[in-house]
Amino acid sequence: MDFKDSPEEAAFRAEARAFLAANARPKGDGAPLAVRSDPATLEAAKAWQRKKAEAGFACITWPKELGGRGGTPIQQVIYAQEEEQFETPPNVFAIGLGMCVPTVMAFADTATKQRFVAPAVRGDEIWCQLFSEPAAGSDVAGLRTRAVRDGDDWVVNGQKVWTSGAHFSDFGILLTRTNPDVPKHKGLTMFWVDMKAPGVEARPIHQMSGDREFNEVYFTDVRIPDSQRLGEVGAGWQVALVTLMNERLAVGTGYGPTPEELMALARALDLGGRPAMADQAFREKLADWYVAAQGLKFTKFRTLTALSRGQTPGPEASIGKIVSANQMQEMSAMALDLADQYGILNDPAEAPFGGLFHRNFMFAPGLRIAGGTDEILRNIIAERVLGLPGDVRVDKDIAFKDLPTGR
Ligand SMILES: Cc1cc2nc3c(=O)[nH]c(=O)nc-3n(C[C@H](O)[C@H](O)[C@H](O)COP(=O)(O)OP(=O)(O)OC[C@H]3O[C@@H](n4cnc5c(N)ncnc54)[C@H](O)[C@@H]3O)c2cc1C
């Protein structure tokens, strides 16, 4: 791959940089923006998304008539590289625009796309992903939320869990079981659902970070018109795979802290009368993280190469999340240790580096689970990248209703 920008790419980068410089502040210039999902933060996130959409920097690769820019994947990457250097409100649209709306675009009719895509791009409407359940996460095809046909409608009953942003979402994509008499992957059907419909109840879950970002979502006799079905009846798994393929790219990498941020902290902190940066044991750990971060950077370039050639990145994109989520956890833990008693502070006004390390420490375990756990991603890499024998799947050919449940 040629790492240098072409003249067109350089012009686009300059345009993106000028837009960001005029509308956002560079990272490190004041305290980071709060990540709490309170109404004020949500409004700030919506305002930022609207501004981006108006300037043509939201959903860069999507068609202009659906609110995008009609640009290239490389332009999307360039914009992300530039935006990374600025402090912007939390991206509450990542799941909607990264996974849900692309699924709607792939399976809905033209009228539905015209109604929903542009408002999502502008940040006026937020979408959530209603897949996981108490007994179906890694094995999401084992889900139990039932949709039963009743005339032109389907009647849905069941419970989802860990649904990010459900409490402030307007719509969601919902994976249901419509036929328990066939093997688990074959009896699923996907719908889009209005989160304000009667019988839908989102209950936020209080997290250790103090935030409430995800939810339990209960469905009680919720009526969904058949016109809201995405894909064929019984083909929900194929629809879900489109969502999950997009998830691999959307969850990806690019989480903090970076080795450079950790170095900045270590230079500022005293350890036994000298800067922590001078400590031999710390330097050895730092070198390991730095090498891994570089490895990650060059693996990302492989994904970029695929994108620039118009290809879809393969399962090797799974490597990025395992490495970056584990690094996030280890580096943040080290930072809190170095900060000693100040490490427990989470108030951005008081904590070292505006609470950056504390926030990442609290979020890292979740990141190691969301979008595929470490173990599941290792299975994917083993099977699809390295060609090792597959995981044991004993329930593949058994009707869902006959699977032992332990009850
Ligand atoms: C921050 C966050 C946000 C989320 N947002 C959403 C969302 O918006 N929408 C949504 O639908 N879901 C969401 N989830 C749920 C997420 O997809 C699931 O938590 C995840 O898939 C794991 O499922 P589980 O929690 O049921 O764990 P389980 O699948 O029960 O796993 C438990 C443990 O067993 C291991 N394990 C399971 N199967 C295997 C296997 N075959 N081989 C080896 N080990 C295995 C796992 O790695 C894990 O350690 C979110 C989760 C988090 C943490």
Image: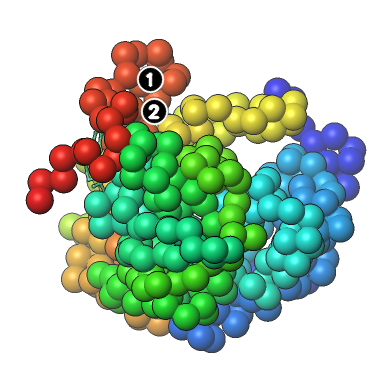
Q: Residue furthest front?
A: 151
The outermost residue toward the left is 407
Structural crowding at the residue carrying mark 1, measured as other residues with C-alpha within 10 Å and reported as few (<14), some (14–19) or many (≥20): some
Q: Residue at 64% of width from left, 73% of height from top?
A: 125
Q: Which mark is residue 70?
A: none
The relative height of residue 115 versus residue 168 in the rendered view (above or below) is above
Spatial separation of the CA atoms under disc 1 and disc 2 = 5 Å
Q: Are marks 1 and 2 in contact (CB under 8 Å)?
A: yes
Residue 246 vs residue 1, the one in the foreground: 246
Q: Position of residue 81 (x, y in %)?
A: 65, 49
Closer-to-camera residue (351/201): 201
Q: Nearer the viewer, residue 206 or 106?
A: 106
Task: Tell me which residue sits at (49%, 27%) in the image.
Answer: 316
- Compared with 200, 278 (above or below) is above
Q: Is residue 159 left or right of residue 298?
A: left
Residue 380's tag is: 2
In the image, taking residue 75 as reference, residue 167 lies left or right, namely left
Work out whether residue 89 or residue 140 is closer to the camera in this orientation and state it: 140
- Determine whether the residue tagged by mark 1 lies in a helix, strand or loop: helix
Amino acid type of disc 2? Ile
Q: Amino acid at mark 1?
A: Glu
Residue 32 x, y percent position in the rendering = 50, 72
**Relative to residue 378, is residue 181 depicted above or below?**
below
Looking at the rendered image, the quarter that the N terminus falls into is top right
Residue at horizontal 82%, vertical 66%? 55
Q: Position of residue 382 (x, y in %)?
A: 36, 21
Q: Which element carries disc 2, helix, strand or loop? A: helix
Q: Residue at x 74, y 58 (%)?
A: 113
Q: Which residue is mark 1?
A: 383
Residue 25 on image: x %, y %: 65, 71
Q: Quadrant of residue 50?
A: bottom right
